[in-house]
Amino acid sequence: MGRAIFILSAVAAFALAVASPAVPRPAAKQLVVDKDKVQCSKADYTSIQAAVNAASPGDTIKVCPDLYTESVNVTKPLLTLVGPTNVNIGKCSTVTAADPTQDAIVTGAGSYSFSLLNNNITMSGFVVQGSVDGIHTSASFSGYRITNNLAQNNSGAGINFLSNGTNQSRADHNCLRQNNASGLQSEVGNLSTGLVDHNATYRNGFAGLDFSGAGARAYVSVTQNSSIEDNSAGFTMDNSIGSSVTQNTAQGTPRLDPVGGAVLIGGANNGLDVSGNSLTGGSVGNGIRFDQNHFFPVFAAPNVGLSVIGNAVTGFGGTGIIAVANFPNLTLSVLSNNDSSNNGIAGIRIQAANNNNTIVNNGADKNNSNGIWAEGATGNTLTNNHMSLNVGFDARDDNRAANTWTDNHCTTDFPTGTICGG
């Protein structure tokens, strides 16, 4: 009898639990911010930070036009912050002042305008200016989406982009201009599983998109971005694994740095893909430059297993593609199907300490010095390259016995008669 009562009681408790409705979760809310309540008279808050403090995960914070002087700390996950600015990245190089009657302009009261310190935070439609850095993310979190923002005139970087890689983080369709350091940087912390695409950069003090300096980069894709007249580099990368710089464009970059590069690669890159970029130079600098010494800290480990394929590089005051002699630099890598022509020095220039690479099917025409120049490098194989109408030599090797040239197409060579047609 006692067992029957126990069974009946258990069944009744189960039935009651099934019949009881689940406690509903609060619906996501939209919180509205307007500093002066002119554009949004029914705004809930007059500061962005107050709205963030009141928000719950999953909420959206709509920020109306005004000038907000505050440093906003976003410490809750799954928040979406939306401003009214619609960025036209095609006109990023057309500089006009932000308008507080049309834009949500955030000027940080401290060292940043926004610090995003949790997972899966989305931020779009803001103008961030006049801070040290415009937007910070954290290497302790992931799942960021930073899109459709204008970051300009910051004394440091427009965006410092970091992530731990648990989920992909993405920065896209932002205009990054006239920041004193870089438009976007990934520094003083790690960036893993990042996608940086369709951004436009203009006249930043160091680089447009800078993936170098203290920290490591893993599985970062930098693709379909544009750089116009950035000072030292359009795109940089060092200390990376499994990353890529592909299908980007640069025009007039570098602007001021004679030893810079539209694509500037430091050391300790493993498996980096630098392919399909279209790079048009100005009066100084290089198209693609491999040079550890251009960065701090210096990562002296060599670049191993790189693919440098299908880039169009023209009109630079220096060399189209250059691997400089400093530390052991470029090794076991492939340079293939690049067109590096009409440059002020050489088309492709491989200096000492760049050894055991394959250089194949490249074009190097009408350069003001040499087409392809092996300048002290050893153990390299150069095959089926096309070089013509270069002012110095179409093909030059200062250490001829140490490299293998076969089936190359050219007219003039040094040492004479040892490369062209051989």
Image (tube, rainbow, N blue to C red):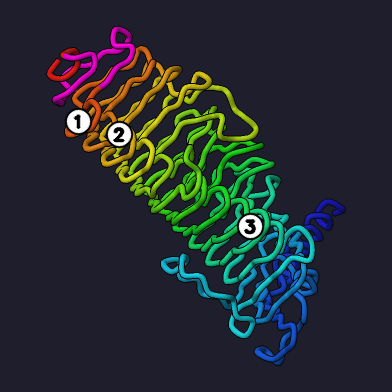
Q: In the picture, which quadrant includes the N terminus?
A: bottom right
Identity of the residue furthest to the top in this view:
401
Residue count near mark 1 (Cα–Cα under 10 Å), binned few <14, some 14–19, many ≥20: many
Residue type at mark 3: give it. Asn
- Give me the disc on residue 387: 1
* Residue 246 point in image, percent of width and height: 39, 44
* Residue 101 point in image, percent of width and height: 62, 85
Q: In the picture, which quadrant includes the C terminus?
A: top left
Disc with the residue nearer the chain's start (1 vs 3):
3
Above or below residue 305? Residue 92 is below
The residue sitting at 47% across, 50% down in the picture is 255
Magenta extent = 396-416
Disc with the residue nearer the chain's start (2 vs 3):
3
User: Which of the 4 image quadrants contains residue 306?
Assistant: top left
Q: Which residue is mark 3?
A: 120
Residue count near mark 2 (Cα–Cα under 10 Å), binned few <14, some 14–19, many ≥20: many
Disc with the residue nearer the chain's start (1 vs 2):
2
Secondary structure at badge 2 equals loop
Q: Which residue is mark 2?
A: 347
Secondary structure at badge 1 equals strand
User: Which of the 4 image quadrants contains residue 153?
Assistant: bottom right
Residue 375 visible, this orientation: yes
Residue type at mark 2: give it. Gly
Residue count near mark 3 (Cα–Cα under 10 Å), binned few <14, some 14–19, many ≥20: many
Residue type at mark 1: give it. Met
Above or below residue 342? Residue 205 is below
Secondary structure at badge 3 equals loop
The residue sitting at 63% across, 34% down in the picture is 296
* Residue 174 point in image, percent of width and height: 52, 62
Q: Is residue 233 left or right of residue 279?
A: right
Is there a contact, CB below 8 Å, between mark 1 and mark 2? yes
